[in-house]
Amino acid sequence: MSATPEATPTIVLVGHGMVGQRFLEALAERGLTATHRVVVLCEEPRPAYDRVALTSYFSGRTPEELSVTDPEFITTHGIELYVGDPAVTVDRVAREVTARSGRVFGYDTLVLATGSYPFVPPVPNKDAEGCFVYRTIEDLLAIEEYARTRATTGAVVGGGLLGLEAAGALKGLGLTAHIVEFAPRLMPVQVDEGGGAALLRTIEGMGLSVHTGVGTQEIVVDASGAVTGMKLSDGSELATDLVVFSAGVRPRDQLARDCGLTVGERGGIAVDEQCRTVADPHVFAIGECALAADGRVYGLVAPGYDQAETAAATIAADEASFTGADLSTKLKLLGVDVASFGDAHGTTGDCLDVVYSDSRAGLYKKLVIGRDGTLLGGILVGDAEAYGTLRALTGSVPPVAPESLVLPAGAGAGAEGLGPAALPDDAIICSCNNVRKGTIREAVSEHRCTTVPEVKKCTKAGTTCGSCVKVLGQLVAAELEASGVEVDKGLCGCFSQTREELYEIVLALRITTYQDLLDRYGREEARGTDGCEVCKPAVGSIIASLAPVIGASGYVLDGEQAALQDSNDHFLANLQKNGSYSVVPRIPGGEITPEKLIVIGEIARDFGLYTKITGGQRIDLFGARVEQLPLIWTRLVDAGFESGHAYGKALRTVKSCVGSTWCRYGVQDSVRMAIDLELRYRGLRSPHKLKSAVSGCARECAEAQSKDFGVIATAGGWNLYVGGNGGATPRHADLLAQDLSDTELVRLIDRFLMFYIRTADRLERTSAWLERLPGGLDHVREVVVEDSLGICAELESLMAAHVAHYRDEWAETINDPEKLARFVSFVNAPDTPDPVVGFVPERDQIKPDLPLLAIGHRPLEGSAQR
Amino acid sequence: MTLALETTDLKVQLRLDGDWLTLCDLSRLLPGRGVAALLPDGRQAALFRDRAGELYAVDNRDPFAGAAVLSRGLLGTHRGRPYVASPLLKQRFDLLDGRCLDDETVRVRTYEVRAA
Ligand code: SRM
Ligand SMILES: Cc1cc2nc3c(=O)[nH]c(=O)nc-3n(C[C@H](O)[C@H](O)[C@H](O)COP(=O)(O)OP(=O)(O)OC[C@H]3O[C@@H](n4cnc5c(N)ncnc54)[C@H](O)[C@@H]3O)c2cc1C
Ligand code: SF4
Ligand code: FES
């Protein structure tokens, strides 16, 4: 300890929340941490974390990942941070703060950033067991624990922003969730009646029960004092095991009241435009505990950040003021976009509304326009794509008609079409951090940032709620292009061409090896090198899909091709987390005989494999050691199985429903068609995996509309849908053609697939490709149905060559001793199994021994030996 | 095209505690890919050969996932230096000094190897 801490002026910060942390950063940026002693009293058991993203805890973010406090920042700047030690009294005469631990700190400047507390209405039994609030990580841990052990139903009191978030969390925890809101609509503060109605439909559609226009009168408890329900103001009773109060927040101003500082009528520590308390020039208040000079208490993080900057600047004797803030918000609540900005409720005199609403789709969009055409504000529910652009245009006259800004995409030059290029330089792009378009452009042009992460770091834009990141990306790309930096669209560091361009080069010049392509067409610096793990498999795939035409071997493990394949393709199996593999034999259309089922069962039993029915209507055998793969496949091939290409960017499965053969509704034989299609396209290498399905009637039991190419039977033949996707970004397929005969159907799929393989990017599913392609579905229809480019004959002949040359990779491999030599555990000890691959029992089968993987860990070796 | 693998009887040797340990024929190494070898102390080494014929060896264990699979990764060149990309989560490791190119705090052991 230094002898006289009094010698340096001391700043004491009470409350280490999001705003408190930002204040510390602002102090450091201004050099004040070097000239001052800085003491922080933090009540919670952990330093500041991202409260805005609190709910992401339930989707797997750990408390550590939520932290916004870099321990290095605290130590580098010599900040004294006392975690779990709140301030209990302030003596303004002696200028001393006393903490719960008994520590006393003298201050020259005191900054209160104590935030808010959740308001709990004074209903009987509000503190019963099973009642919670939703504010801190500790609250979430308690809710999670209770929901897991003691609840099946949960109710949230309050249908505002936080209430909806809490209800979504309860649903995610597996509870039946209710929302009780006193106002006649959800999110009364942010949205109007129309928006509330759109929101209600969507949220009810998700299986949450919403009760609006009713208040909570009493919490009902059982003999042990635990919650069993709640009585509502309409006389009804709602059974529930758990209650979360989310009925608004109140500023935490008790400490300030106790020491005689002025607080507002409805709470909040009164401050001036410099965030200094009106009663005492030595004390500041910032964030949710402050009643700002404009008479408001702000419950959002962005205004709090502005106040933090203002207070730090004032302490540094710089000019700064906080006079009020924009209350724009964009949220994704339970997967529904909700945004409001500017004067959302149209309180400005003489303004007009432009409203677009589609209740079936849960869409509601309203713009508030001033007399002179100025965009004053708006509300978007269901689709907030245009939020970034619209918010930035607020306060100006938009360059296009207001209607076109809210119409759905495609129905006019929407705000998306308008793009951020149309925005003025002083438009605010990131409202959380108050970053203007001009600042972002400068980051690119003057500070030489070339990527979004760099711009984020440089300007702080996009680092808080993330809602502006999309616009940010567009601006960065536009600015790079404008400043003459060519945006590199190349496949990777080795090739400046796109995948499509490389495909054309390989096809036109009949190039059959990667090295040849790299040395002749790679970037200067990449020629003669070993390339990279991005372009090797991509080029390997191009060569494989064109093999019969360009005269390369069609066998992916031949010669150099073997060296290009991703590890899975190299071993013709899927690598699992412990180094073992899974084996997926092809089961075309999902149809399988009892004999074949028995063979699979016997093999799994003999090799001790874990078996599971996959989501693709076939069977996966897990836990095979690399040296067992040939033995397993020898038996599978003997029984008539082929590779299922579960490892490849290739055709996976063509799922089927049982169809007209058995089903009373079926109108075509969907199983036969699925088998035919699966056998036709098996082994076809493509930019990404290909999935398909055939349904026997419009009931769609095979889910064909979620596939890259899906087929649905009609009375007159088949409908072909393309560009569907499950996975992370689901997309329903688009109807390409109707009532096709068998031959027409196959011909059209041949063309479609070959056109996709030819023009898609690496790892671009048909859905993303269709969305990216200029002209979209119409263009694809012109090319593959109407043959506008005159390439259909070529596409068909490429597919014919593929079909004619197909051979089963596994059958070839087990008959080739040279290839088999690769399937060994160790090159020098082929009979010793890898000791790291171990298994433990689970539900009568096996699973990887994960602790074994962890103990294998050794500390880093000292210096390099080579 | 099929690459003609060299059919010399050269052996791949790895240096361990000052001695050269013979592991396999050079012909077992396909340019651009690797093989795993078991060392007497129970460790595993991943042996590689690049397209220029240079040999490299690093510890076979992927320090991120724990599995012994680095030998099954793809080789590449980054700023003129050879690396292997793990087949599990694709982190890249410099084959000369074992440093992870995607996380500077992680490093795998390297070994001296030669064809003799
Ligand atoms: C085994 C299986 C899960 C299961 O136990 O049911 C599975 C397992 C894997 N899936 Fe899947 N998916 C399986 C059906 C599906 C389905 C359902 C379907 O096909 O009808 C989907 C959604 C449909 C779709 O793709 O549109 C699906 C969407 C994905 C995705 C997301 C793709 C996307 O476009 O967003 C990935 C990741 C990727 O490919 O980049 C993925 C990736 C994977 C990988 C390859 C992840 C990996 O690299 O380890 C898994 C390895 C399989 C293995 O080791 O054998 N899997 N996966 C299913 C195998 C089906 C089969 O018989 O071949
Ligand atoms: C679930 C959830 C979602 C949210 N989503 C959004 C959003 O999308 N957008 C948005 O703008 N805002 C959102 N908010 C609001 C946002 O989190 C707050 O505006 C912001 O955290 C306010 O920061 P603060 O530092 O003023 O207060 P807080 O973050 O509450 O920090 C105050 C801290 O002070 C501590 N403290 C209080 N008294 C004392 C004392 N006497 N001594 C020591 N420490 C004390 C408290 O324990 C607390 O840790 C959300 C809030 C929640 C709970
Ligand atoms: S999609 Fe139609 S034909 Fe096929 S199983 Fe379902 S109802 Fe039957
Ligand atoms: S608007 Fe929230 S991070 Fe930019």
Image (spheres, rainbow, N blue to C red):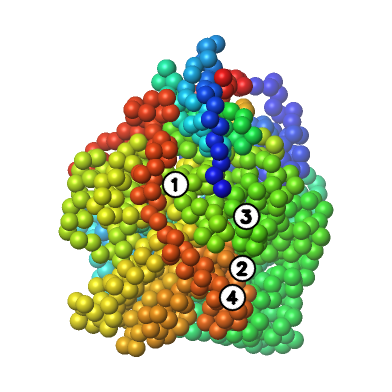
Disc 2 and disc 1 on one polypeptide chain: yes
In this rendering, does residue A481 appear at all? yes
Label 3 or label 2, whichever lies nearer to me, is 3
Instruction: Decide which of tag 1 and tag 3 comes sooner along the chain.
Output: 3
Q: Secondary structure at mark 1?
A: helix
Whether residue B13 sits left or right of residue A824 in the image: it is right
Residue B103: where, in percent of width, then height?
A: 59, 37
- CA separation in Å, label 3 and label 2: 56 Å
Disc 2 and disc 4 on one polypeptide chain: yes
Pointer 3 chain: A
Instruction: Decide which of tag 3 and tag 2 comes sooner along the chain.
Output: 2
Image quarter where ligand 1 lies: bottom left
Instruction: Decide which of tag 4 and tag 1 comes sooner along the chain.
Output: 1
Q: Which residue is mark 2?
A: A328
Give yes or no for contact between labels 2 and 4 (Cβ–Cβ under 8 Å): no
Pointer 2 chain: A
In this rendering, does residue A574 appear at all? no
Q: Which residue is mark 4?
A: A791
Q: Secondary structure at mark 4?
A: loop
| Quarter of the figure with residue A24 | top right
